[in-house]
């Protein structure tokens, strides 16, 4: 088995990738002055969750059952991220006349509304979430994050299955 397909190494690489992506998002925000919309903020939180779970898994280096538990928590974070990023990509691809109006800022919503209502408002989306301010190879940042979430989930499952087969 290739060294990066060993579960401990894979989890460590995922943690490093998540840290790099959150770091780049912070760079874009604070150096390039591209303010994140509410959906972007929640995508960052999903990457932080995945990175934290992966770092714990790499440090713990559990047995087979523990790897699958960490893999499940990683997948849950990825599925949440895919849902958020998928919604974001959908909003970005709406015709201009169907884009929702810009809403309140996330900080204001968190200060004045119950958290459940904030989530509802954020996932409904707003006009600011439909703007495409950054692209690489024809894909927006939410499209790239969607690919990363999907890749983390699929490759983690492959790594865990391969590790289980080599033990048998």
Image (cartoon, helix red, strand yellow):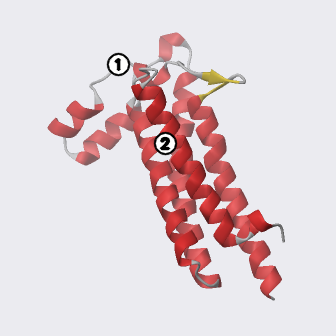
Is 71 situated above or below 80? Answer: below
The x, y position of residue 153, in whole percent, is: 65, 57
Position of residue 74 in the picture relative to residue 162 (left or right): left
Query: Total of numbered circles in the picture?
Result: 2
The x, y position of residue 66, in whole percent, is: 57, 80
Labels 1 & 2 near each other (Cβ < 8 A): no
Q: Quadrant location of the N terminus?
A: bottom right
Q: Residue at x 55, y 62 (%)?
A: 74
Q: Indicate the secondary structure of the residue bearing disc 2.
A: helix
Q: Would you call the spot at circle 1 few (<14 residues within 10 Å), some (14-19), or many (20 or more)?
A: few
Can residue 36 be seen in the rendering of this structure? no
Position of residue 119 in the picture relative to residue 53 (left or right): left
The x, y position of residue 98, in whole percent, is: 49, 16
Label at residue 102: 1
Position of residue 147 in the picture relative to residue 45 (left or right): right
Q: Earlier in the sequence, mark 1 or mark 2?
A: 2
The x, y position of residue 86, in whole percent, is: 57, 38
Q: Quadrant location of the C terminus?
A: bottom right
Q: Residue 106's quadrant in the figure? A: top left
Q: Residue at x 39, y 24 (%)?
A: 35
Query: Distance of mark 1 from mark 2, alpha carbons?
Result: 25 Å
Identity of the residue furthest to the top in this view: 97
Find disc 2 in the rendering and name its residue: 22
Q: Residue 157's quadrant in the figure? A: bottom right
Is 103 situated above or below 150? Answer: above
Is 155 situated above or below 19? Answer: below
Can residue 127 be seen in the rendering of this structure? yes
């Amino acid at each position: 088995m290739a060294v990066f397909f060993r579960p401990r190494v894979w989890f460590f690489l995922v943690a490093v990738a998540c840290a790099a992506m959150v770091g780049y998002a912070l760079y874009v925000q604070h150096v390039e002055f591209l303010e994140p919309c509410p959906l972007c903020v929640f995508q960052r939180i999903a990457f932080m969750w995945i990175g934290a779970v992966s770092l714990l898994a790499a440090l713990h280096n559990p047995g087979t059952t523990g790897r699958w538990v960490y893999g499940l928590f990683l997948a849950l974070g990825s599925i949440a991220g895919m849902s958020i990023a998928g919604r974001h990509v959908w909003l970005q691809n709406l015709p201009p006349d169907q884009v929702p109006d810009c809403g309140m800022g996330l900080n204001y919503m968190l200060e004045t509304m119950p958290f459940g209502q904030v989530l509802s408002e954020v996932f409904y989306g707003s006009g600011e979430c439909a703007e495409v301010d950054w692209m690489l190879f024809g894909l927006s940042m939410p499209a790239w994050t969607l690919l990363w979430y999907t890749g983390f989930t699929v490759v983690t499952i492959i790594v865990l299955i391969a590790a289980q087969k080599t033990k048998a």
